[in-house]
Image: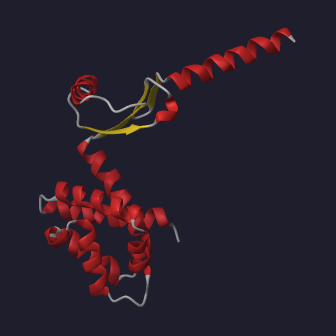
């Protein structure tokens, strides 16, 4: 059984259903929340995949992990369909496929910035404006992380390109050049 085919089909069906009801953005946002909770709380996955737990309890659990009582009806119906066909083991794959399909449909670019220390809000906003200008106004999702191991500077990634302007990266490149130069001498 191919997990990729199953997850793409269910994700495509959910996206089409949500688009028919003009609610795809709400579904997208709630799926992001659910995936975050799914990753942080391992008990959710175990409860959803447990055959002893009833269908209604699983739906309530997924709703609570998503947005509580404000879970959109499209997502609630989707949970019911998924559990009815006993596809709960594919839930994470299906949700990630939905995110991918949604971003592709809406032409959303993803990026990240890793810095040694938190950036001021105005600097981050200026950087986002520069990136939006580069992508000619297309939507950009931008994740920022703080990693003190890079010592200073930052690492910026957008799509397929990456700019490493970190001190740790520069030291690594200098070390590599030094080793190469000394190999030729010996």
**Among all residues in the image, which is located at the extreme top?**
185
Side of 1 relative to 159 (left or right): right
Viewer can see residue 80: no
- The colour scheme is secondary structure
> Left or right: 129 with respect to 166?
left
As rendered, which of 77 and 41 lies closer to the eye? 41
Identified at 23% across, 37% down, the residue is 139
- Residue drawn at point x = 23 percent, y = 55 percent: 29
Image quadrant in which the C terminus is located: top right
Q: Is residue 75 left or right of residue 37?
A: left
- Quadrant for residue 87, please give it: bottom left
The x and y percentages for residue 113 are 38, 33
In front: 139, or 57? 57
Residue 16 screen position, x and y as percent: 23, 61
* Furthest residue toward right: 186
- The percent coordinates of residue 108 (x first, y second) are 27, 41
Q: Tell me how many marks there are.
A: 0
Q: Nearer the viewer, residue 165 or 105?
A: 165
Q: Quadrant of residue 54?
A: bottom left
**Residue 174 location in percent, x, y?**
63, 16
Q: Residue at x 23, y 30 (%)?
A: 121
Q: Is residue 28 visible?
A: yes
Say above or below: 42 vs 179: below
Residue plotted at (29% across, 77% down): 61
């Amino acid at each position: 059984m191919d997990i990729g085919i199953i997850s793409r089909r269910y994700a495509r069906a959910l996206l089409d259903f949500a688009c028919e009801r003009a609610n795809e953005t709400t579904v997208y946002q709630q799926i992001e929340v659910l995936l975050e909770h799914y990753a942080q709380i391992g008990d959710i996955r175990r409860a959803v995949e447990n055959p002893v737990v009833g269908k209604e309890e699983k739906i309530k659990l997924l709703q609570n992990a998503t947005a509580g009582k404000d879970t959109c009806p499209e997502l609630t119906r989707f949970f019911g369909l998924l559990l009815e066909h006993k596809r709960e083991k594919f839930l994470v794959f299906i949700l990630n496929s939905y995110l991918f399909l949604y971003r592709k449909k809406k032409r959303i670019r993803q990026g990240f910035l890793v810095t040694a220390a938190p950036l001021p809000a105005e600097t981050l906003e200026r950087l986002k404006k520069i990136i939006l200008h580069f992508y000619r106004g297309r939507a950009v999702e931008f994740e920022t992380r703080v990693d003190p191991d890079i010592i200073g500077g930052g690492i910026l990634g957008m799509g397929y390109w990456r700019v490493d302007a970190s001190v740790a990266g520069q030291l690594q490149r200098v070390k590599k050049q030094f080793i190469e130069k000394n190999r030729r001498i010996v």
